[in-house]
């Protein structure tokens, strides 16, 4: 990532010789090249709402679900390596395991991971889930009656909790604390909605062997 983009964060997309960083910019670049079906509503008011919700979930959910998740995952070296190196060959797992103490230190520093931060992030994730449930329209979508960038962002960021069959990796089991956290919320309407979005719009990944 440092070599390609000058920074360490994902996602990043290499497209037409350019490295594009940040999910919002990536979506905009792909939308410009492949506008049908559109993720941006045509109506200006609906488009503004979709972009506002995309920004909310990107900023208020994404960092916090990651921080809470990794706070607990990084305490279990075997589970963390299995997750970080999912679908990679055995040699990659060995290399990750050897480098794990350094990886854990860097991730904790980069993401501000500590007990207090994780506790605060759990509250923010719960607030985002409540916001999601309050924003859902009668159509079952967040904006109007069609799938938009708002639905894509919210469903994708709740993906680590949903763990849908359509997720593009065969994820290892959650560590107990995270499994209990997921169990406490999985029946909420918002997570059931996210599961529906995966099933309806993601499709089963060809990378996952049934």
Image: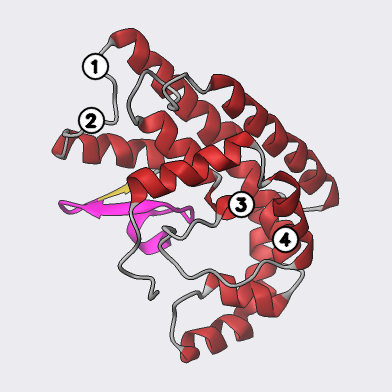
Q: CA distance from mark 4 to mark 1?
A: 40 Å
Residue occupied by mark 2:
38
Disc number placed over residue 42 in the picture, else none:
1
**Distance CA(mark 1)–CA(mark 3):** 31 Å
Q: Earlier in the sequence, mark 3 or mark 2?
A: 2
| Residue at point 73%, 41% (across, down) | 121
The local secondary structure at tag 2 comes to loop
Q: CA distance from mark 3 to mark 4?
A: 9 Å
Q: Earlier in the sequence, mark 1 or mark 3?
A: 1
Pointer 2: residues within 10 angstroms few (<14), some, or many (20+)?
Answer: some
The image quarter in which residue 132 lies = top right
Query: Does any portion of residue 44 appear in the rendered image?
Result: yes
Q: Give whichever of 171, 122 is nearer the camera.
A: 171
Q: Is residue 192 above or below residue 46?
A: below
User: Residue at the location (61% across, 52% down)?
Assistant: 161
Residue 17 lies in the magenta stretch: yes
First to last magenta residue range: 1-18
Quarter of the image where the N terminus is located: bottom left
* Residues tagged 1 and 3 counted as in contact (Cβ below 8 A): no
Q: Split into 4 quadrants, where in the image is the C terminus?
A: bottom left
Q: Secondary structure at mark 3?
A: helix
Q: In this orientation, does residue 113 appear?
A: no
Q: Is residue 191 above or below residue 93?
A: above
Query: How far separated are the C-alphas under marks 4 and 2?
Result: 35 Å
Task: Give the number of the mark in front: 4 or 1.
Answer: 4
Tell me whether the residue at label 2 lies in contact with that at label 1, contact meaning CB atoms closer than 8 angstroms: yes
Q: Residue at x 59, y 41 (%)?
A: 191
Q: Give residue 161's mark.
A: 3
Q: Is residue 58 left or right of residue 131?
A: left
10 Å neighbourhood of mark 3: few (<14), some, or many (≥20)? many
Residue topped by disc 4: 179
């Amino acid at each position: 990532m440092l070599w390609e983009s000058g920074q360490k964060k994902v996602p990043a997309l290499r497209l037409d010789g350019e490295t594009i960083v940040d999910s919002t910019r990536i979506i905009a670049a792909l939308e410009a090249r492949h506008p049908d079906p559109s993720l941006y509503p045509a109506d200006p008011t609906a488009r503004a709402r979709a972009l506002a919700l995309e920004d909310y979930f990107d900023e208020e959910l994404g960092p916090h679900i990651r921080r809470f998740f990794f706070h607990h995952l990084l305490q279990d070296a075997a589970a963390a390596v299995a997750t970080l190196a999912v679908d990679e060959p055995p040699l990659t797992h060995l290399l990750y395991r050897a480098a794990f103490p350094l990886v854990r230190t860097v991730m904790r520093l980069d993401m501000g991971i500590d007990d207090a931060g994780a506790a605060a992030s759990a509250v923010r994730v719960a607030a985002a889930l409540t916001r999601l449930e309050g924003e859902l329209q009668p159509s079952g979508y967040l904006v109007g009656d069609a799938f938009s960038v708002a639905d894509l962002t919210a469903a994708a960021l709740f993906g680590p909790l949903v763990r849908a069959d359509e997720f593009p990796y065969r994820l290892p089991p959650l560590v107990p604390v995270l499994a209990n956290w997921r169990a406490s919320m999985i029946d909420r309407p918002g997570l059931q909605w996210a599961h529906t979005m995966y099933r309806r719009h993601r499709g089963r990944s060809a990378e996952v062997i049934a």
